[in-house]
Amino acid sequence: METRPRQKHDQARDQGRQPTKRVQGKQSKSGQAKNSQRIEKEFKDHPKGKGLTPYQGKKRCFGEYECPKCKRKWTSGNSWADMGQECIKCHINIYPYKQSPLEKPDGLDVSDPRKEHPQHLCEKCMVLGYYCRRVQ
């Protein structure tokens, strides 16, 4: 019997997290389209297969991860080119299998600042020696 794919909010609830909500900005449709086109162009301009991750730009992006050992899945708004995150269960560095642009209505970062970023599991934070979100 085939089951439907689990929704992100189901996964978040099962992992003890609050599901994230998309926040709509007050940007005009033409402004949103231009911003979206710019972000998509940045992702397309970096060829796949030339690095450890799908995205090869310099900016932070949204990443999707899956540990091959324990099959744990997670997502992160702190994903970077050629940088991984450590699986909290297996303690091995995992690179994202999918990366996409962050959606920033009106140029604002809409991620929840109260949610703690586990810097001890983030390769970018460890390489920098400080919180990776300070990089602009």
Image (cartoon, grey):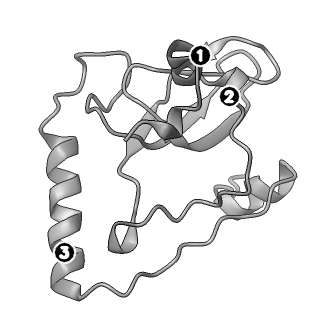
Badge 1 is on which residue?
Answer: 126
Q: Position of residue 136 (x, y in %)?
A: 37, 42
Mark 3 to mark 1: distance in Å?
36 Å
Badge 2 is on which residue?
Answer: 119
Mark 3 residue crowding within 10 angstroms, few (<14) / some (14–19) / many (20+): few
Query: SS for tag 2?
Result: helix
| Mark 2: amino acid | Gln
Quadrant for residue 5, please give it.
Answer: bottom right
Q: Position of residue 25 (x, y in %)?
A: 41, 81
Can residue 7 be seen in this snapshot? no
Badge 3 is on which residue?
Answer: 33
> In the displayed structure, does residue 50 sit left or right of residue 100?
left
Residue sitting at x 65%, y 57%: 113
Tell me the tag on residue 114.
none
> In the displayed structure, does residue 18 sit left or right of residue 99?
right
Query: SS for tag 3?
Result: helix
Precedes in sequence: disc 1 or disc 2: 2
> In the displayed structure, does residue 91 sit left or right of residue 64?
right
Can residue 56 be seen in this snapshot? yes
Mark 1 residue crowding within 10 angstroms, few (<14) / some (14–19) / many (20+): few
